[in-house]
Image (cartoon, coloured by chain):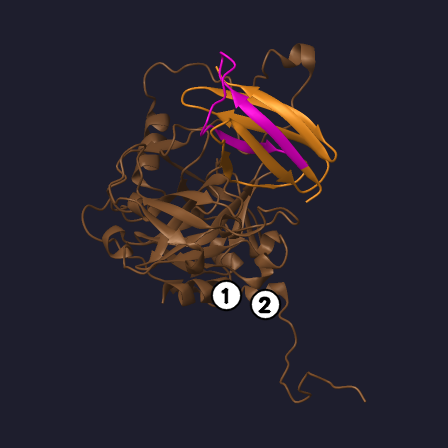
């Protein structure tokens, strides 16, 4: 693995969202079709196989958020649901 | 004096070429429908009845239709340009929500909550291939994250067969690390071509749910077939099962490529063909997100391992 994406999923009020489903939706290479559940503090981290642009998507119940991030060694993002 | 630890008389054989892993014979292991209701497939149909009903409605019209906007770009791109291309859901999303998960075949598909070595939790999908075995993706049982606490065999997997949101018609059970299986080709390096694994059960829970058959078929048999997939995508309401179907996009000796709509959480889903009313998995879904989606093909050695794990 050559990079890591760290982030947090927040609700519309800025509070952390536990058990949001976060996945790498697109990237420079095919990606495993798993999704990570955020922790109690809303955080998550993914290892990525190579540098490049990745689309990260988070789903809550009835809401979702998406971000595109350029990864070299590491990147950090916030995803706000709602 | 050197001490050679390798027995010079140990037999060896040439390595198998990938193309040799796809034989000319059709290997099949049959399905079983388990106990209770079954949704049978009419003769000649190669997709699930729910799909056939949709296709019929589209062919004959279903009243006023909303305009097809699938080819239109989001307005934000007019200002900000196109996003990173997302191709996991291929074209219009016409996945079908399955609510009759207490019936065969839907109950063979399992919602998985995977606890990794570092305590993080992930979602995936598995499917019964026998009374005591559930097949999934290799990366659902062994995670590659070198030099991190996440790397290696996962701690455990919570399995919920036929889950329908909050409803668990067959309950929930936990498979510990000791009962997980994969292959050296996956555990030694993250090689897509060997991305498959299994959970072995101490009790025959598949006797209730039934199981999918599985098959290693040559290209000539697979080309032109309709592929079916049902699993637990994370972009839909939590724990709901969704089904889709598509044609084969491409084949290689160790991979099957298709335009089936999938999303994170469906890794491990069985990709299956319906033949003479029976359902046979021909691949294990594993990858999306770049070009067409793909799964590990059930070729001869994969078939042999699935049969070994089935017991």
Left or right, B138 with respect to B47, comes to right
Q: Residue at x 32, y 32 (%)?
A: B165
Magenta-drawn stretch contains A11: yes
Q: Give the vertical position of B10 relative to B51 (above or below).
A: below
Give chain B's shade: brown
Quadrant location of the N terminus of chain B in the rendered image:
bottom right
Do tags 2 and 1 sit on the same chain?
yes
Q: In this rendering, is residue B297 above or below B165?
A: below
Q: Which residue is mark 2?
A: B20
Task: Report the span colored magenta.
Answer: A4-27
Mark 2 residue element:
helix
Taking B252 as reference, is B81 above or below it?
above
Disc 1: which residue: B300
Q: Chain of mark 1?
A: B
Question: Which chain is drawn using orange?
Answer: A
* Position in image of residue B69 (x %, y %): 51, 17
Q: Residue visible at 27% across and 59% down?
A: B204
Quick one: B103 or A31, which is closer to the camera?
Answer: A31
Left or right: where does residue B197 sit relative to residue B170?
A: right
Q: Position of residue B160 (x, y in %)?
A: 33, 44
In-image side of B151 versus B175 (left or right): right
Whether the magenta-drawn stretch holds residue B174 is answered as: no
The quadrant the C terminus of chain B occupies is: bottom left
Of the image marks 2 and 1, the number of the one nearer the N terminus: 2
């Amino acid at each position: 693995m050559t990079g890591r994406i760290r982030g947090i999923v927040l609700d519309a009020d800025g509070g952390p969202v536990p058990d949001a489903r976060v996945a790498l939706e697109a990237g420079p290479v095919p990606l495993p079709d798993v999704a990570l559940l955020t922790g109690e503090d809303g955080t998550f981290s993914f290892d990525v196989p190579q540098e490049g642009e990745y689309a990260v998507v988070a789903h809550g119940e009835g809401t979702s958020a998406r971000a595109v991030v350029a990864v070299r060694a590491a990147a950090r993002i916030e995803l706000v649901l709602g | 004096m050197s001490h050679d630890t390798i027995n010079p008389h140990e037999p060896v054989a040439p390595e198998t070429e990938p193309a040799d892993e796809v034989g000319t014979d059709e290997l099949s292991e049959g399905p079983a429908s388990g106990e209770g209701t079954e949704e049978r497939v009419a003769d000649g149909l190669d997709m699930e009845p729910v799909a056939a009903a949709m296709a019929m409605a589209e062919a004959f019209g279903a009243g006023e239709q909303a305009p097809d906007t699938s080819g239109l770009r989001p307005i934000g791109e007019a200002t900000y340009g196109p996003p990173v291309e997302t191709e996991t859901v291929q074209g219009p999303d016409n996945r079908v929500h399955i609510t009759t998960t207490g019936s065969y075949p839907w109950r063979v598909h399992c919602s998985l909550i995977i606890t990794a070595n570092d305590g993080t939790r992930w979602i995936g999908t598995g499917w019964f291939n026998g009374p005591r075995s559930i097949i999934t993706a290799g990366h659902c049982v062994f995670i590659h994250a070198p030099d991190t606490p996440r790397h290696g065999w996962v701690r455990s997997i919570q399995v919920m067969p036929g889950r329908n949101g909050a409803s668990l018609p067959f309950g929930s059970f936990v498979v510990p690390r000791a009962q997980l299986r994969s292959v050296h080709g996956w555990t030694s390096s993250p090689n897509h071509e060997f991305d498959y694994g299994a959970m072995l059960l101490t009790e025959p829970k598949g006797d209730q749910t039934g199981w999918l058959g599985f098959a290693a078929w040559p290209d000539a048999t697979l080309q032109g077939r309709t592929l079916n997939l049902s699993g637990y995508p994370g972009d839909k309401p939590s724990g709901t099962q969704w089904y889709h179907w598509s044609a084969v996009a491409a084949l290689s000796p160790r991979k099957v490529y298709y335009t089936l709509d999938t999303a994170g959480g469906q890794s491990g889903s069985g990709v299956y063909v319906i033949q003479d009313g029976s359902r046979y998995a021909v691949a294990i879904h594993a990858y999306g997100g770049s070009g067409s989606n793909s799964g590990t093909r059930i070729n001869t050695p994969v078939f042999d391992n699935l049969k070994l794990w089935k017991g």
